[in-house]
Amino acid sequence: MKSQTITQPPDALATWDPNTSPCNWTRVSCGDHGQRVVDVDLSGLGISGPVNPHIGNLSFLRTLQLQENQFQGIIPETITNLLRLRILNISFNSIQGAIPANISRCMKLRIVDFMQNKLSGSIPEDLTLLVNLQILNLAGNHLSGSIPPSIGNLSSLLTLKLGTNTLSGPIPGDLSRLVNLKNLDLTINNLTGIVPPSIYNMSSLETLAVASNDLGGDIPYNVGDTLPNLQIFNFCINKFTGTIPGSLHNLTKIRGIRMAHNRLHGTVPPGLGNLPELEMYNMLASRT
């Protein structure tokens, strides 16, 4: 791997000497028992080139962090051999191609962060078999197709970020089965239809962001009661109709309310100026 990569600074992997134990190399950690590599952290080293498929030989690997580099090429299929992997982060690179279809082999994955790459194709159904996932971040890619309803099976999920792709179709009501979900970001896609009513009953949500889609329908009046933990409410640049929900003043933890560029009418509900954490709101501009 060292011979096939360029790092910044150039000597970042100077300790990677084949004549010494990898357990003594910088950015590499081994387990307490034996000499097995369990963690590799190459984040922020300016590494260019492909992700070496030999990474799949590290069968005891639990953490692989490759974020904030200049990796290119595809995600090697050999990554799916890492059956003990818990954290897989390749965010902020230039990785292309599809997400490996058999990624479900890595059943212990808790964090999958592919944000800000050039991944294409659809979200594979296999991804929704990773029942231990807590964070799934696929934002900032070129993913297309629909959102698989089976994502609702990921009962441990805390964060789901699918924004800034070209996903289309409706928002699956099955997402409301994610009873532990705190952050739902579907912004900047081509989603259509309405926000399923069951989504508005996800009381665990802290972020609900669906801005810049083609969504419509009325926003429930009592959203400020059914989403008590909401901190970010971003519904701008859609086709929502009806009035601005009068219960928004009950969101005592809210930091941002964005509803501009829709087809809303009526007046701004009173009491928003008394919200203690509110930093910004934008809801006045209309969209024809």
Image (cartoon, rainbow, N blue to C red):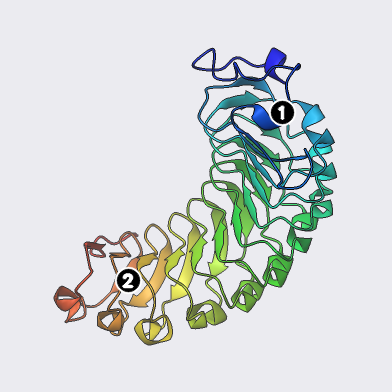
Image quarter (top left, top right, bottom left or bottom right) of the N terminus: top right
Between residue 27 and residue 287, name the one nearer to us.
27
248 sits to left or right of 55: left
Please provide percent x and percent y for residue 242.
36, 78
**Which element is circle 2 on?**
strand
Mark before the other along the chain sequence, 1 or 2: 1
Please provide percent x and percent y for residue 64.
66, 40
Q: Which residue lies furthest to the left in this view?
A: 273
Up-down: is 98 above or below 83? above
Image quarter (top left, top right, bottom left or bottom right) of the C terminus: bottom left
The structure residue drawn at horizontal position 61% and vertical position 74%, both measured from the top left corner, is 178
Hey, which quadrant is residue 29 in on the image?
top right
The structure residue drawn at horizontal position 75% and vertical position 55%, both measured from the top left corner, is 127
| Amino acid, disc 2 | Leu
Q: Residue 264 carries which label?
A: 2
**Which element is circle 1 on?**
helix
Q: Mark 1 points at which residue?
A: 22
Query: Alpha carbon of mark 1 to alpha carbon of mark 2: how far?
Result: 60 Å
259 sits to left or right of 125: left
| Amino acid, disc 1 | Pro
Please provide percent x and percent y for residue 116.
54, 39
Up-down: is 177 above or below 137? below
Hey, which quadrant is residue 90 in on the image?
top right
The structure residue drawn at horizontal position 73% and vertical position 35%, both measured from the top left corner, is 75
